[in-house]
Amino acid sequence: MKTYLTVTVAMFTGAAIGGFAVQGLQAQAKPPVFQVTIQDASDLAALNKEFVPLARPTITANGGVLLASGEPTMIEGSPIKGRVVINQWQNIDQLKKWHSSPEYKKAREIGDKYAKWQMLVVDGVPK
């Protein structure tokens, strides 16, 4: 009788561990989101001096990753006025938390003196 109980407990334990492992794998399979910002700066030097040093740490502190920043090279279409910044986030909720954080809002007040912004988010593609 003791052997049957041990085997039964081991079977249910294995099933529970397997269930958690599958959930973890499914959570990892979700692609990230990418934030694309176009900054039309009236004073790029001041933006880089006053805004960037405040804003960038807020991205990493909230789980974002800076992927690209600079003036784009156009391949097709009309030229974009300004520079482009691309950040990666685990999900839209993480991005929204960063965007509404007091630290970013403080940085943005300074940035708004030197630039106009367009910001959009696109979903990553599953691998």
Image (cartoon, helix red, strand yellow):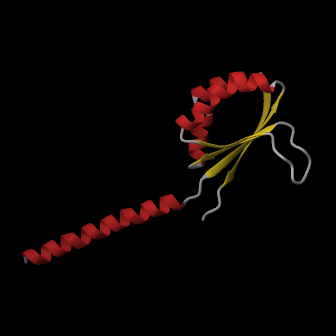
In this rendering, position of residue 52 left or right of residue 24: right
Residue name at image x 69 percent, y 21 percent: 50
The spot of residue 84 in percent (x, y) is 76, 41
Rendering quarter of residue 81: top right
The spot of residue 13 in percent (x, y) is 25, 67
Residue name at image x 38 percent, y 64 percent: 21
Classify the position of the N terminus by image quarter: bottom left
Classify the position of the C terminus by image quarter: bottom right
Q: Farthest residue in the left direction?
A: 1
Residue name at image x 13 percent, y 73 percent: 5
Q: Farthest residue in the right direction?
A: 78
Question: In this picture, is 39 found above or below 109?
Answer: below
Q: Is residue 114 visible?
A: no
Question: In this picture, is 67 found above or below 1?
Answer: above
Residue name at image x 17 percent, y 75 percent: 7
Nearer to me, 118 or 70: 70
* Tally of marks: 0
Nearer to me, 68 or 104: 68
Rendering quarter of residue 48: top right
Question: In this picture, is 93 found above or below 8?
Answer: above
In this rendering, position of residue 49 left or right of residue 77: left
The spot of residue 27 in percent (x, y) is 49, 58
Q: Can residue 94 be seen in this view?
A: yes
